[in-house]
Image (tube, grey):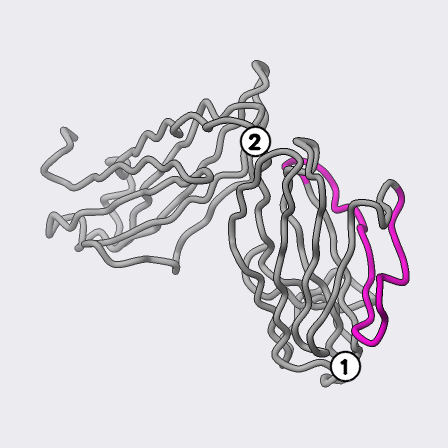
Amino acid sequence: MLGTLCTLITALTYVSCQKAVTQTPSVLTVSTKGTATFHCDITKDESYYAIWYKQVPGGAPQYVLKYHYTLDSPDEYGSGFSSDRFTSKATSDKDYQFIISNVEEADSAVYYCQTWDDSVEEIVVVFGPGTKLIVTDGDLATPAVTLFPPSTEDLKSSRATLVCLTSDLSQRSKGLADVSWMSSGESVTEDVSTSPAEQQPDNTFRISSYLTIQTADWDKDVVFTCKVSLGSTFSEKEIRKTSCSL
């Protein structure tokens, strides 16, 4: 799930909506037995509650809890989740917090905040972009990053694709790495496609990310950078036409 995602209740159809959901931080690293706090900010709210989901890479979303901002505690929990470690609170009908106490490695996942938007003709479900929680007792290994240039065939057209492959992400990391791109030192978010983490036979994870560029920029020897962050560690690779032998 990337950015605010709006979906009709009655069908898996993406629609425009007037409500935006922001989640911070994007990545949260916590030691075992610590406390993880997630923030969900809603631009406007008429439903007065937020629902939280947990999703591990390659798995289906799990319903964690629903919280109404006028209540002192969540009024509904999903299977396997209870108030002894999972709770929520709100400072208003727009600002919600989700809290996991005494965190365990099994809590490592992406957590999504969800609400509703009934300002359009049909009520739609609105999801936030998610917060990645990494629970660990030690330092995580620096991600291994390989950056591939466009293919010769690609360069015959006006647009070409760079591929950034992140490999050997440890089982402990759950593949919860963030991939970002830069062009000449400036952040790039358009024309980027990043696959979910894929678990390999050796239990490590791999992530592939793709950046579509203008072939003219490649010919101008523009420098493109792929940066992969995992908790407090990161690795980045640069590529440009003159650094490649095609």
Label 2 amino acid?
Thr
Q: Is residue 101 left or right of residue 178?
A: right
Hey, what amino acid is under mark 1? Asp
Most foreground residue, 74 or 157? 74
Describe the element under mark 2 as helix, strand or loop. loop
Q: Which mark is residue 136?
A: 2
| Sequence order check, earlier mark of 1 and 2 | 1
Residue 140 locus on image (x, y percent):
46, 28
The percent position of residue 74, horizontal first and vertical second, equals 85, 61
Q: Is residue 196 left or right of residue 45?
A: left
Which span of residues is magenta-colored? Answer: 56-79
Please name whichever residue, 109 or 157, is drawn nearer the observer in this view of the structure. Answer: 109
Residue 236 at what x, y percent from top left? Answer: 29, 38
Position of residue 55 measured from the top left corner of the image (x, y, whole percent): 69, 44
Q: Which mark, residue 118?
A: 1
- Residue in the picture at 60% in, 74% down: 20
Q: Give the quadrant of residue 2.
A: bottom right
Q: Residue at x 76, y 83 (%)?
A: 46
**Residue 136 vertical placement versus 227 (above, below):** above
Magenta segment main secondary structure: loop
Find residue 119 and report its image quarter: bottom right
- Mark 1 or mark 2, which is nearer to you? 2
Secondary structure under badge 1? loop
Instruction: Look at the image and say whether residue 27 sits in the magenta stretch.
Output: no
| Crowding at mark 2 (Cα within 10 Å: few <14, some 14-19, many 20+) | many
Confirm or deny contact between disc 1 and disc 2 (CB under 8 A): no
Q: Residue at x 64, y 74 (%)?
A: 42
Position of 43 relative to 243 (above/below): below
Query: Is 234 situated left or right of 53 in this image?
Result: left
* Residue 78 within the segment the image draws in magenta: yes
For the N terminus, the image quarter is bottom right
